[in-house]
Image (cartoon, helix red, strand yellow):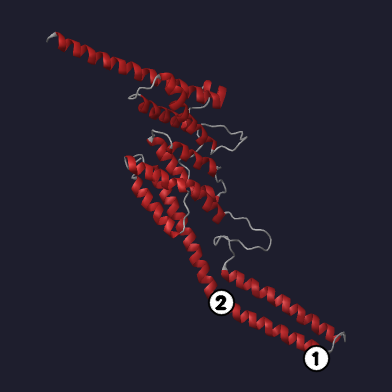
Amino acid sequence: MNADDYRKSADALGSILDGATRRSGFENICSEAVHYELQAQFGNDYTKGSIPSGLYGFLLQKMAKAASDYALPKDIDQREFEETLLNDALGIVRSLRYAFVRYGSEKSSPNFWDNNASPLEKIRTKQVPYIDRSELESVVGDYLALPYRSQALDRFLVRVLIAMELYAFGDEMLNEETFGLFPARSPLRQRHALLGYLRGQLVNGVLFGGIAALALWAGSSRLIGLSTAEWITGVCGFLFLALASVSTFALPFWWYAQAMARRRVRKLLSGMSTLYNEQKSDGPISAQYVRDRAEDATKQGVVWPAPLFALLDDIISRTGRF
């Protein structure tokens, strides 16, 4: 081996060592920044080890690594990295957590989202989690504006965007509050068509029967003429029978329309829930598959948040999976 070969080997070794040193420095910066962020959010509970880093710490670490992987091949010094790229990465996760933690909430936990929960069960038990729609959509926009991506955050954002619409729609359909005589808009909360029909007949019977009885009493008491009382009674009987006939004729159509509306709502909820649960996979997930399923649901009436498709399109343009 001549002098040139030794020189080239030394240069290559020096480059490898410099790269390793640079990577180690960036990793230390990321680790310290994540630790500081957790300490700032959870104080002594985190410092003493009372609570784990949880989901919040996991996403912070993944975003910090994504920023580091982006910066390492580029001519970016450590200070610039810490003040710009890393700060933006951690800020995304911080804002994301705020979208799920109600302002002033006393419950402070790094696990701000329950990945194992069944949305439909939570909706039925009226335990719908807090989700700030505008904040979450803003986070997606800020994330897509970054020059780097994190597969972990891709997956989490896709899942919670699906969950946001599922919880909102499910809560509206299953837990709608009604006031007084105003009927529910949700087909699942409306009175059954048959019960509505029977209730209508009862109300009409009481109303027209009461008027007829009052007229007959007034006639027998000579407050009005007997013929007038009989005429009023006849009109009440005619109106009752006419309304009863119309209602009876319309009952099958009301029943069928209500059954179809309820079936449609249940189908939408089932499809949305299935799509959400499919994101639990530990393996790679096809963004195109998720997009196709979401589009099918859209054709059936689901109104997904717009950032969901923007995020899926971004993933498809990169690796196509998350």
Residue at image x 76%, y 79%? 211
Mark 2, Cα crowd under 10 Å, few <14 / some 14-19 / many 20+, is few
At 47% from the left and 29% from the top, the residue drawn is 88
Give the amino acid type for the residue marked by disc 1 in the picture: Ser
For this rendering, which residue is in front, 183 or 19? 19
Which amino acid lies under the numbered mark 2 shown in the image of this protein? Ala
At mark 2, the secondary structure is helix
Give x and y (percent) for residue 21: 34, 16
Q: Which mark is residue 227?
A: 1
Check the image and name the residue furthest to the right: 222
Q: Residue at x 42, y 23 (%)?
A: 81
User: So how many labels did they put on this image?
Assistant: 2
Give the answer, above or below, for where 100 lies relative to 119: above
Residue 118 visible in image:
no
How packed is label 1: few (under 14 Cα within 10 Å), some, or many (20 or more)?
Answer: few
Image coords of residue 127 (percent x, y)? 56, 46
Location of residue 246 by image quarter: bottom right
Question: Residue 170, image x and y in percent?
Answer: 52, 53
Name the residue tied to disc 2. Answer: 250
The residues tagged by marks 2 and 1 sit, at their Cα atoms, a distance apart of 34 Å
Residue 111 coordinates in the image, percent (x, y): 50, 34
Answer above or below: position of 124 versus 100. below
Q: Is residue 46 visible?
A: yes
